[in-house]
Amino acid sequence: MKVYLYNTMSRTVEEFNPIKEGFVGMYSCGPTVYNYAHIGNLRTFIFEDVLKRMLRHAGYKVKHVMNITDVGHLTGDGDDGEDKMSKSARETGKTVWDIAKFYTDAFFADYDSLNIIRPEVVCPATKHIDQMIALIKRLEDGGHTYIAGGNVYFSIDTFPEYGRLARLNLDDLKSGARIDIDSNKKNPKDFVLWFTNSKFGEQAMMWDSPWGRGYPGWHIECSAMSMHYLGEQFDIHCGGIDAIPVHHTNEIAQSEAATGKKWVNYWMHGEFLLSDKGKMSKSSGEFLTVSVLKQHGYDPLDYRYFCLGATYRTQLQFSYQGMDGARTSRLGLVDRIASLGDSVAKPAEVSAKAHEYMDQFDGFVCNDLATARGLSVLWGMLKDDSLTNAEKRYVANYMDEVLGLGLKAIKAKKDDNSDVPAEVMELVAKRAQAKKDKDWAAADLYRKQIDDMGYLLKDTPTGPSLQKKM
Ligand code: AMP
Ligand code: ZN
């Protein structure tokens, strides 16, 4: 199965060719754990999950590494502001370690509820300080750093390729440079690799280093940890689109300056989820979480369905109307699949038509994750009466390897009333007798009593069917 991916580096869709046959090394920038993830962040993690599922579906073994930023991410991307973790600790009166633990757990609870497959490696920055120090030393030995005001800086002038990913014009940067608040920097785009000097004084998270006691810059963690787990060259690096101009640009500079080699072959970025006020963000103070969606009566998978309905490379406007549509569609899907029976095994014979649907689906999702088109193939297949129920379930399961909507786990609808309490069944029998006797008033009364006991009664051609009310 051929795979095509949009590479931000080349700004084109390219055929995917892994470094090692049959294997994909994939790194994604993980959450900064100072607050709950908002559903915008989670859109990016859903995109990465679909990417990983698609690669597995296409036959690759995927090693997915994701960091947890529990130190060093300042409130501003350009080395300005306070450490996000410290700020949250100061505001809540908790320790930074408590904050990190609490929000990491909360993050993975959301992750699981959205049916996102956990990465093979989850690496917290605070547990990899040695790797970061080693990488900074390597950069220092190569002449890419300088020390000013107690901090170690990366000098972008030592890396001529700087800014390639974001297509930054360095001449413009120099001539039109904004007055940078950090006067230690030789070039305004230089960035800190190691802080020993913070305007916020004693940080709770500090480590000894050759440059003094301090803490790492945000960008160095992703370079150090990805290379530690995936090697000095790997296949795919992904994240949100906001990481392109600073974070990923700086990651590339550090990594390639250290090794002298191309670092990553494919760069992939998910577009923003928008709220009424523009990009959904944590710092704006008002953001939607999975819990808020649940409070509004949605299943987290409704949100996953909502995201799958748009391509990951376009902005997506959040609305409750859109969520209602996603919920209706997803429940419709669940209902249809439940009516197909329980069989999840491959049917004895899979028709040419069923194969056609699978190929069509693969053609879409393996072409830069066209999930919305993939969903419409799934719907078309389910509505096609030329396929048997067993085939439909089989094909739906096949497609769900990529979509991740939990379709395989859907239990077949029970037509019998075996788990309905005896008292309710007694009323059903009495109502049937009343109907036979043409005593409509009594029949209505029994129906009302059944309803009061929490069951909805529907007359069907094969007799009365009962449904437990939610
Ligand atoms: P953070 O926890 O702030 O480090 O962000 C985690 C991920 O979410 C990063 O890859 C961001 O680029 C991404 N992200 C942030 N805001 C949005 C948004 N509104 N829509 C989609 N992705 C976002
Ligand atoms: Zn990163």
Image (tube, rainbow, N blue to C red):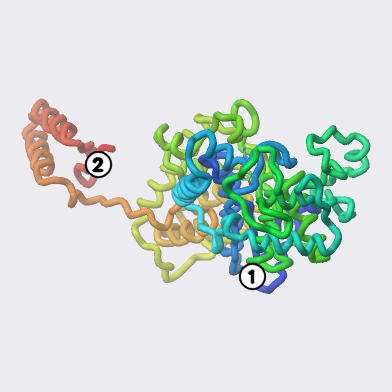
Residue 16 picture location, percent across and down: 71, 63
Residue 128 picture location, percent across and down: 61, 60
Outermost residue, bottom direction? 21
Relative depth, front residue between 422 and 51: 51
Picture quarter with the C terminus = top left
Which residue is pictured at 36% across the width and 62% down the height?
343
Residue 227 appears in which quarter of the rendering? bottom right
Q: Is residue 179 left or right of residue 280?
A: right
Circle 2 residue: 467
Asked which secondary structure carries label 2, the reply is: strand
Callout 2: few (<14), some (14-19), or many (20+) C-alpha neighbours within 10 Å? Answer: some
Which residue is pictured at 33% across the width and 54% down the height?
412
What is the three-letter code of the residue carrying label 2? Gln
Circle 1 residue: 23
- Marks 2 and 1 sit apart, C-alpha to C-alpha, by 48 Å
Which residue is pictured at 10% across the width and 36% down the height?
431
The answer to whether residue 54 is visible is no
